[in-house]
Image (cartoon, rainbow, N blue to C red):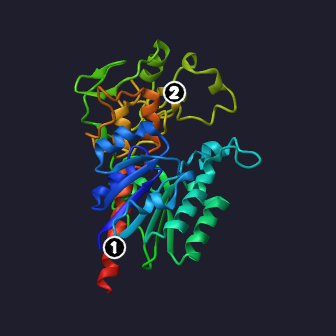
Amino acid sequence: MPCVAVDLFCGIGGLTKGLTLSGLDVVAGIDIDETCRFSYEKNNEAQFINEDVTNLSADTILNLYPNDCIKILVGCAPCQPFSRYSERYRKDGYTDDKWRLLYSFTRIVEETNPHIISMENVPGLAKETVFQDFINTLERLNYFVDWHVVYCPWYGVPQSRKRLVLLASKFGEIHLIPPAYEQGNYITVRQAIGNLPQLNNGEVDDNDPLHFACHLSEINRQRIRKSLPGGTWRDWEESLQLKCHKKNSGKTYSSVYGRMSWDQPSPTITTQFYGYGNGRFGHPEQDRALSLREGAILQSFPPDYIFIDDEHPANRCELGIHIGNAVPVELGKAIGVSIQEHLKGVEDNG
């Protein structure tokens, strides 16, 4: 039987691309953000459906699957409400309704009854009631469930990101494949982006409009010149330090305005990775922050993944959100390979 996947909360297609690279057929991605359509459809042979998953009907999804196929449903509900950053500001419950989207995922599972499910999110979700409710529903529906918090460099992502990955199957035990990399041979920043053309402050690569360096102010140019790979703002002379660095509340954020190290995975790529002052996003060697192309590659998108063209321009903020919120492609591929190996085992066992 053919295996066919639908990707909920698909964004620009990080998970879809990974599943496709593993050999799975993804027929559609569904997302509320219409601005993701161009990149999703340009880089994937799948339909983009602009709908709110909260209001999505089971029939809409079921009609995407051909008859007599193994139905796979995957997705990464927006994770900001469960992140460590948001946790600092959450006092008495959630202030962001996005956390309810996992309950929408649960409803869709109940109504469509797919054979295989995968869900990816931030590790903090594991502590929340909504996640346990999701697992309880899957088990009640006779799925075998397996989930882990994984370190993305284990699966070829050149970025020190941790993610929660859940797999569930109607056919029995399913597990994520063992790590392909270990400390000592993780893919590094140098291996990922070291061969890209050099950029000066504010410069754009003539051959790739996504590879450009945001303009730095004179004071920030002085700061990055004094920054060491893997170092902190404490390496600067006092005249370059910000007022917030001198407060007790600011002393703990040592990675802000930092340079990445060539021979390690990058820090977690956020939605504002292109800004020098937003984290350890300084280039290891050049006096600038990461380009959008570099951030995409560190998210393990293929170097030729298309985000814009003359008819589909996008601003820096929008592209940063698209890239930073994506599922790392190589993690998506590992999920796809895990599903393929599980199904092969089911077939071999009759």
Quadrant where the N terminus is found in the figure? bottom left
Furthest-right residue in this view: 92
Question: At 35% from the left edge and 49% from the top edge, which residue is drawn?
Answer: 47
Task: Tell me the residue that label 2 is attached to.
Answer: 277
Q: Quadrant of residue 244?
A: top right
Can residue 216 be seen by looking at this rendering?
A: yes
Residue 200: image location, x then y, percent = 32, 19
- Judge by depth and name the residue closer to the eye, 344 or 5: 5
Considering only vertical position in the picture, is 229 above or below 97? above
Question: Disc 2 or 1, which lies upstream in sequence?
Answer: 1
Position of the C terminus, as image quadrant, is: bottom left
Q: Are marks 2 and 1 in contact (CB under 8 Å)?
A: no
- Label 1: state its secondary structure: loop
Kindly report which numbered mark, 2 or 1, lies closer to the viewer in this rendering. 1
Q: Nearer the viewer, residue 179 or 307?
A: 307
Kindly identify which residue carries mark 1: 68
Residue at 36% x, 74% y: name it.
Answer: 342
In the rendered image, the vertical position of residue 284 relative to residue 154, given as above or below: above
Horizontal side of residue 91 vs 66, given as left or right: right
Left or right of residue 275: residue 238:
right
Residue lying at 66% horizontally and 46% vertically, measured from the top left:
87
* Residue farthest to the top, as pictured: 218
Where does the image place residue 331, in percent across and percent down from the top left? 39, 55
Residue type indicated by callout 2: Gly
The correct choice, above or below, for 22 with respect to 311 in the image is below
Give the SS element for disc 2. helix
Q: Which mark is residue 12?
A: none
Give above or below for 18 relative to 275: below
Give neighbour class at mark 1: few <14, some 14-19, many 20+ (Cα, 10 Å): few
| Residue 66, percent from left and from top | 33, 65
